[in-house]
């Protein structure tokens, strides 16, 4: 029997895990409960801002540049600056899912859509197979939990006052189920670290033509909010703390991601339409974006630096399940390591741990330390801002010098490691 790795959850972390496991030589099955890949990546679109540039080039130097190459094919703006963020790239949210779907197929990944894992069957401390909502059982040698932390609508209703019908579409495809929790991992949950998604999206065609043209030309716009207009989201707990800057409260910050990314958790419709250029504005995601947003970080899965879940012998985790980290690049980082190590575990090789001499390894070490500290649970960690980006900057880990980044990876003995077949 060939070595089989099953990944649960088709967001950026799950797709990265699938790509890494396939590159390592495993037969890969990716289970996605909806009919689309990428999850919140369907409405994300921001890459390369601040330290994410460094981390993405580290991953490419380690042989995990596959998804970044796919993203580059659908990127519509490069080297965009907006408040607190520099040299960002913005990908087209309308085209990225189909591009990623084709790329995974080219790697031989078998994606099972509308396949919701709801339980596990175990043999001691090992998972033997997953149980799907239709009763089907899916066996594998190793598994990756990339089920995310957002929703279902019960959580959103409890925290924000109502399901806002976000990109995850829980009412249509069913609630998120934590595979780690089903396998017996002692997961952390609580209001201490729950937070609201930090941005929403408008339909580009609903803006005044002059405003849409200006945004497409520049990639980003900063529009002052009238002084008389109150803002309800100042007290909202933002998942994306890198955007919790005064500029994002005092202005409407727009990014062109194919649709129009509005860098606020929500903005009341009547107030938005009172601003010139927004008279006919309509939300693209979430549909109730005038009221609230999806709630994330409802659960954290205990794990070690190899991404192996504590207490389960053949289960790894990735993405937001792995700690209080925010962003597509961060998800790709954890997913790549989890998928690669799932194959290493299956074939009896020593698990890989990324050293703190590179930003990807340093971030994972910081997150692990944060999970043991009450104060650490108050922060979100990202290459793009907040406390961790400050750490990157102060320590010299942040750089836009690609040769320096490649040399750092080479010095760590990690050049091309994720592109090597393990079987």
Image: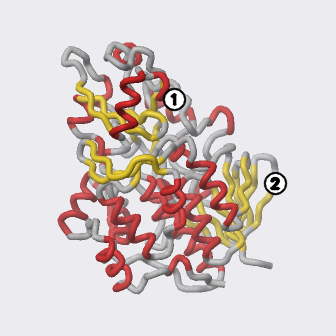
Q: Is residue 10 left or right of residue 337?
A: right
The residue nearer to you, when weighing 254 against 38, is: 254
Residue that carries the numbered disc 1 in the rendered image: 284
Residue that carries the numbered disc 2 in the rendered image: 136
Q: Of the residues tagged 2 and 1, which is closer to the observer?
A: 1
Above or below, comparing residue 264 to residue 60 in the picture: above
Residue at x 73% of width, y 61% of height: 110
Q: Is residue 262 left or right of residue 349?
A: left
Residue 269 image position (x, y, % from top left): 41, 17
Q: Secondary structure at mark 1?
A: strand
What is the quadrant of the N terminus in the image? bottom right
Above or below, comparing residue 117 to residue 183 in the picture: above
Residue at x 52% of width, y 76% of height: 418
Asked where in the image residue 315 lies, by quadrant, the reply is: bottom right
* Residue 384 visible in the current orientation: yes
Q: Secondary structure at mark 2?
A: loop
Residue at x 42% of width, y 57% of height: 323
What is the quadrant of the C terminus in the image? bottom right
Residue 116 image position (x, y, % from top left): 70, 48
Q: Tell me how far mark 2 sits from mark 1, CA to CA.
A: 35 Å
The residue nearer to you, when weighing 217 against 176, is: 217
Count residues near mark 1 (Cα–Cα under 10 Å), then give few for <14, some for 14-19, many for 20+: many
Residue 310 image position (x, y, % from top left): 52, 68
Q: Is residue 124 left or right of residue 344?
A: right
Asked where in the image residue 344 lies, by quadrant, the reply is: bottom right
Above or below, comparing residue 167 to residue 385 in the picture: above
Q: Is residue 276 left or right of residue 91?
A: left
């Amino acid at each position: 029997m060939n070595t089989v790795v099953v990944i649960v959850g088709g967001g950026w972390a799950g797709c990265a895990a699938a790509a890494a496991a396939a590159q390592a030589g495993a037969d890969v099955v990716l289970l996605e409960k909806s009919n689309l890949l990428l999850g919140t990546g369907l409405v994300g679109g921001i890459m390369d801002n601040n330290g994410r540039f460094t981390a993405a080039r580290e991953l490419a130097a380690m042989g995990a540049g596959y998804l970044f190459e796919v993203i580059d094919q659908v990127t519509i703006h490069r080297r965009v600056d907006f408040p607190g963020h520099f040299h960002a790239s913005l990908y087209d949210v309308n085209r990225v899912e189909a591009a990623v779907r084709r790329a995974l197929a080219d790697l031989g990944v078998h994606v099972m859509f509308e396949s919701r894992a709801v339980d596990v069957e175990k043999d001691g401390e090992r998972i033997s197979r997953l149980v799907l909502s239709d009763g089907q059982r899916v066996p594998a040698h190793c598994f990756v939990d990339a089920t995310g932390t957002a929703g279902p609508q019960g959580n959103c209703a409890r925290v924000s006052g109502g399901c806002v019908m976000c990109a995850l579409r829980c009412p249509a495809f069913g609630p998120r189920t934590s595979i780690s929790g089903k396998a017996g991992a002692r997961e952390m949950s609580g209001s201490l670290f729950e937070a609201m998604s930090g941005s929403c999206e408008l339909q580009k065609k609903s803006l005044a033509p002059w405003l849409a043209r200006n945004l497409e030309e520049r990639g980003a716009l900063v529009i002052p909010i009238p002084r008389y207009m109150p803002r309800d989201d100042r007290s909202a707990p933002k998942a994306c703390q890198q955007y919790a800057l005064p500029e994002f409260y005092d202005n409407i910050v727009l990014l062109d991601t194919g649709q129009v990314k509005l860098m606020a958790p929500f903005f009341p419709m009547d107030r938005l339409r009172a601003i010139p250029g927004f008279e006919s504005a309509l939300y693209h995601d979430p549909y109730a974006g005038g009221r609230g947003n999806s709630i994330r970080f409802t659960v954290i899965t205990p794990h070690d630096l190899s991404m192996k879940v504590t207490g389960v012998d053949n289960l790894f985790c990735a993405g937001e399940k792995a700690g209080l980290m925010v962003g597509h690049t961060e998800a790709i980082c954890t997913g790549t390591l989890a998928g690669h190590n799932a194959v290493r575990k299956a074939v009896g090789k020593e698990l890989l741990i990324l050293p703190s001499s590179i930003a990807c390894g340093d971030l994972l070490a910081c997150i692990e330390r944060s999970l043991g500290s009450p104060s650490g649970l108050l922060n979100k960690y990202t290459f793009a801002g907040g406390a961790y980006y400050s750490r990157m900057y102060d320590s010299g880990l942040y750089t836009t010098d690609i040769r320096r980044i490649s040399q750092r990876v080479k010095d760590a003995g990690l050049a091309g490691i994720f592109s090597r077949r393990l079987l």
